[in-house]
Amino acid sequence: MKRTVACALDIGSTKVAAAVVENPEERRPRLVGLGVAPACGVRRGVVVDLFGAVDSIRRAVRDAEMIFGEPISLVVAGIGGEHLKSLHSRGGISVAHSSLGISLQEMQRAVAQARSVSLPHDREIFHTIPFEYVLDGQPGIKDPRGMSGWRLEADVHLVTGSTTAAQNLYRCVEKAGVEPCDLVLSILGAAETVLVPAEKVRGAILLDIGGASTHMAVFLEGELLHTFVIPLGGGNVTNDVAIGLRLEPPEAEELKKNFGVASSHLVDPEETLVLPPSAGRGERKISHSILASIIEPRMEEIFGLALRELRSLGLSEFLTGGVVLTGGGAMLSGAARLAEEIFDLPARVGVPGGFGGSVEQAVNPQYATAVGLAMYACGHELGQRKPRGRVFGFFEKTVDWMKEYL
């Protein structure tokens, strides 16, 4: 039986996760390996210490290999961070022979025109995702092949980012002893495994709350419409707790994980917590509501910035699929309830799904990106070919995506 195997890396500011997914023909994907290591040398999605990042990647891959039982040679790496920017573009062409109908090649030419945007010399297009075609002024066409018309235009979603950041990420993976065959937008991986098709059709907001930043993706009518990066994440919550309660960051992180609540309405004001000794002070007792009052404003700020971005695009009233939270920050108790209050939409915590296997550890929001990237790579057969000799094959990726989409 033919099978496809892909390994993906989620290289974040707090952890590096490596996931291996096997996709046997005519069967559901299986997670067959997962490795996790603390992240070193990565800050806000950008490599700041090459050797530290290489060591973290090597350890995560090694742990995944031990579970998988086979060596890993090719990987798909997720790319994220504040350097990513999203924009919409439209490009069009004249159809030479209207009576013959629109061809795939003409669709590709229209997409290529839409990609012809002016960018600074240090930025590149990472993803080109067509979401609509316009034929002779008629919008809303998903697949114009075979249709007659004289003017074909493509509306595309472009994700751009720093060329230097991508090259350094590529170099880290290579120096860790594995070949990076593709770099994929991290939020696409999370969406692959935590969103269901019905949510994408009705309009869903995916928030991947990482350690240093929160990535947002907006889907409508089954297509990705917009991406956005908020420069705040779970690490900011930890810092707030550390400063507010005068704790060391590791102690604040442990307190947040064990007792942190994003919505103060869920806390009994009479309940007390015992803080560990810190800075020469003995044990202290505080009200649980004090901890909640430190965490809630920061989570409100993250959700508020996401809502402001949606309103600036005029999308908020069309998204009825709700809000899905994932990433390590989504594990905070009450996060979904707070999101419901701010967005005035149903909200839930998204955990990786849609796969089999016996790696129970993976059913956790903080591994959604790694597992989803591996599933995405299997579905698009990204991890099966050798690197092209460049950091990206941008136009080739667009063609591959269009073939899969159509």
Image: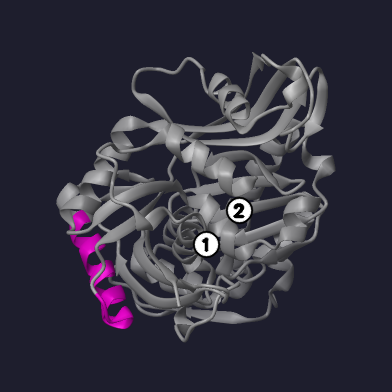
* Residue neighbourhood size for the residue with mark 2, other residues' Cα within 10 Å, grouped as few (<14), some (14–19), many (≥20): many
Is residue 181 visible to the viewer in this orientation of the structure?
Answer: yes
Specify which label sits upstream in the sequence, 1 or 2.
2
Image x and y of residue 391, in percent: 30, 38
Image x and y of residue 196, in percent: 70, 63
The residue that appears at 53% across and 23% down in the rendered structure is: 112
**Number of numbered callouts drawn:** 2
Q: Is residue 140 left or right of residue 249?
A: right
Looking at the image, residue 219 lies above or below residue 176 = above
Image x and y of residue 27, in percent: 57, 77
Q: Is residue 44 magenta?
A: no
Residue position marked by numbered label 1 in the rendering: 327
Identify the image quadrant of the C terminus.
top right
Please state which amino acid type lies under the numbered disc 2.
Leu
The residue that appears at 37% across and 57% down in the rendered structure is: 383
The residue that appears at 43% across and 50% down in the rendered structure is: 212
Residue interval drawn in magenta: 54-70
Please state which amino acid type lies under the numbered disc 1.
Gly
* Residue neighbourhood size for the residue with mark 1, other residues' Cα within 10 Å, grouped as few (<14), some (14–19), many (≥20): many
Q: Which mark is residue 207?
A: 2
Name the secondary structure under disc 2.
Answer: strand
Q: Is residue 4 left or right of residue 163?
A: right
